[in-house]
Structures are given as C-alpha cells and as structure tokens.
Image: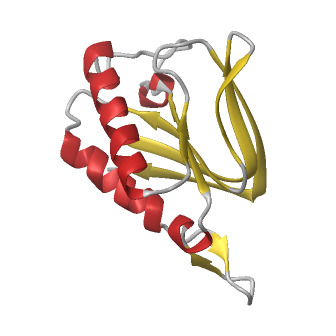
Amino acid sequence: MKGLLQRVRGARVEVGGDIVGAIDQGLLVLVAVEPEDTREHADKLLHKLLNYRVFSDPQGKMNLSLKDVSGGLLLVSQFTLAADTRSGMRPSFSTAAPPALGAELFDYLCQQAQSQHAAVASGRFGADMQVHLVNDGPVTFMLQI
C-alpha cells in the first residue's frame, strides 16, 4: 500500500462539480492499493498517517503529528501511484490491485480513519475527481507499507 502524503493548508476533492470532501490544515493523502495488500497494511498506513511528524513545533522543527495539531485528513484513492513505470513510454497498471480489492481496502482505511480521528474526509473510489490543494512547504512524502 502506498500513500503520497502532502501537508496542506487546505484541500478539497470534487466529483462532477460537487465537493465530496474537504479539509483545512492537515494532510491530503493519495492512496494506492496493490494486489498483496491487506487490512493489516491499511492499519499500518493509517497509524503512520496519524502519527508521522510533519508539522512544525514552536521552534520550526517537524516534530508534531496530525493528531498533535488536530488537523484534517483527506484520503483520495489513486491507483496510478501503483503503476509500473520502469520501461516503455506507457505505464503498466498490472501492479495495482483489482478494483474490488482496491475499493474494499480504501473503504476500510476511510472507516478506520473516521473511528480514530475527528476530521476525516475522502474522495470517491473510482470516480473522475478533481483535487485542489495548497501544499504547505511544500512538504510531500511517499509512504510505502
């Protein structure tokens, strides 16, 4: 499971012109599910997202987590992060989970996040989404579980 974490001042995701998820300060995470992923992988990714220290403390050091700053968490499924781009001029998606597994694990991740953190929003699995964000820093990390 992969998560492209971006520290944001604000972010939202739209489907068909309607806002389906939005946060103020926090983390926007693009999530890719791979064929071998399980609920355990989703649990590990969520633990890391909630506790990864990417927010500045009063001394300007990245010592605070999403939980510490009570920030928002916006989860957006993005199977293209699982693409194999090592050869050729077109990505291969054979390394992405089948849609049924991707949907199941993304939904599970969202449900677990909502049960563990106050401010959680998400995109819509499989939809054509437009993601708007103000990356803060910029601060971006690729997490692989």
Viewer-nearest residue: 95 or 134: 134
**Which quarter of the picture shows residue 44?**
bottom left
Relative placement, left or right, of 102 versus 77 is left
Relative placement, left or right, of 120 versus 18 is left
User: Can residue 99 be seen?
Assistant: yes
Task: Tell how many labels.
Answer: 0
Query: Is 16 located above or below residue 86 in the figure?
Result: above
Residue 142 in picture, x, y percent from top left: 51, 50
Residue 120 in picture, x, y percent from top left: 52, 46
The structure residue drawn at horizontal position 33% and vertical position 14%, both measured from the top left corner, is 99
Query: Is 17 located above or below residue 5 in the figure?
Result: above
The structure residue drawn at horizontal position 42% and vertical position 47%, both measured from the top left corner, is 114
User: Can residue 1 be seen?
Assistant: no
Q: Quadrant of the N terminus?
A: top left
Residue 20 in picture, x, y percent from top left: 62, 25
Query: Is 22 located above or below residue 143 in the figure?
Result: above
Residue 123 in picture, x, y percent from top left: 55, 28
Query: Is 129 located above or below residue 135 in the figure?
Result: above
Viewer-nearest residue: 93 or 60: 60
Tell me which colouring the rendered structure shows: secondary structure
Pick out the residue farthest to the bottom: 59
The structure residue drawn at horizontal position 68% and vertical position 83%, both measured from the top left corner, is 57
The structure residue drawn at horizontal position 36% and vertical position 32%, both measured from the top left corner, is 106
